[in-house]
Amino acid sequence: MKNEGIEGTERFLSPGRSRGLRAVRHFAVGELVFACPAYTYVLTVNERGAHCEHCFTRRDDLSKCGKCKQAYYCNVDCQRGDWPMHKLECVAMCSYGENWCPSETVRLVARIIMKQRVTTERTPSERLLLLKEFEAHLDKMDSEKEEMNQADIAALHHFYSRHISDLPDDQALTELFAQVNCNGFTIEDEELSHLGSAVFPDVALMNHSCSPNVIVTYKGTAAEVRAVQEINPGEEIFNSYIDLLYPTEDRRERLLDSYFFMCQCTECTTKSKDKAKMEIRKLSSPPEPKEIQSMVHYAKNVIEDELLEMCELSLEKMGAIFADTNVYMLHMMYQAMGVCLYMQDWDGAMSYGEKIVQPYSIHYPAYSLNVASMYLKLGRLYLGLEKKSQGVKALNKALAIMEVAHGKDHHYVAEVKREIVEQK
């Protein structure tokens, strides 16, 4: 396949960022900038039986692979379509049985190796950027990342060396794993639940901004890039690599740790939302900066350790200083909401969702999937609790965002519309 490019865009040298993607025509809010099929992908193990291994369709009547009995498909066509990749895992799963447990990243890299062996030309997912051009940032990796890389290489050898002849040498594998870690994507559903991992080279060409003008959503195993701001000819097209809820210092730390750069976007240089995100209670004696920093440190430790059983205690402790709209309070409320959902405490989950959704709408950019997901969760909770008018209102707010972010013809949009119609 020749380098045909992507209509309406071009690859260019972005000042201070090396390569990037820019518009050569105008894109309106909600307009599809481009779609990109996955170079290769894997369904997460937790969704087996609920989604088709090949097309990621969610349905109840899937048929399982007759050999490994672990992969599920819509029909024979999907099973045949997936066989060139699945046969690698099928044989290994039959061989290892319950002991077959490579990570999702290892599974994805194994598929990339197999794909590279049978693909000699540029693929439809590499119209502007080849997978082999991915940055690896090997010179910036610390000892912890190097150890993780070596563990992945060891797992690849352990689970696949019998089934992939002549694996690349360790130097090549070190670079490939680093490339995937810096450029891989997680495919998510309409509620942002994890479905799988994939590589989309053309999508990876876009640089990051904390005020992105596009958003990436998924239709099956294809990525769709849509404008969430007006984009004029000559303007660079920016995606976001991270969750944008948090203040500038946090975002920069995450970007530096995972992607090895210090973000200098407008949002990071102006810090325009930091005050609202770090709201402090109006106290007779305002806390000292050191006390605030200590509470931030405490909040991060609780969040990172995922001590969900401490949610209520943590909210009480942080609430002595932080306002309910503070992003660390919101994060803890989100965790508490998840615990309530797990325990089927629908009223508790609804209560947390109601506290979260409005601050989310302020802190996140317009047309954020995080906001849509929260309205969606809240709407479905309302309907389950027979609060019909509130449920329809929340679903309509989710729908307004999803029609821009996913596109009006997306099956997730159709599902939400159907839920709304059923309430009339």
Image: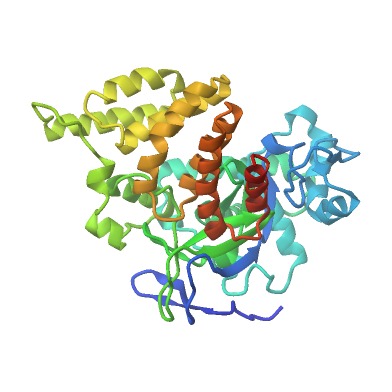
Residue 376, located in which quarter of the rendered image?
top right
Residue 155: x and y in percent read: 64, 40
Residue 322: x and y in percent read: 25, 31
Q: Can residue 304 be seen in this view?
A: no
Residue 86: x and y in percent read: 80, 48
Residue at screen point 73% across, 60% down: 115
Name above or below for residue 291 compared with residue 183.
above
Lateral position of residue 173 relative to residue 304, left or right: right
Residue at screen point 58% across, 28% down: 386
Residue at screen point 27% across, 25% down: 319
Q: Is residue 374 visible?
A: yes
The one nearer the camera, 145 or 359, is 359
Lateral position of residue 234 relative to residue 184, left or right: left
Name above or below for residue 357 compared with residue 221.
above
Query: Going by the picture, which residue comes out furthest to the front?
Result: 424
Name above or below for residue 217 compared with residue 420.
below
Q: How many labels does the image show?
A: 0
The one nearer the camera, 167 or 315, is 315
Q: In which quarter of the image is the N terminus?
A: bottom right
Lateral position of residue 230 relative to residue 75, left or right: left
Residue at screen point 74% across, 37% down: 48
Residue 56: x and y in percent read: 72, 48
Q: In which quarter of the image is the C terminus?
A: top right
* Colour convention of the picture: rainbow
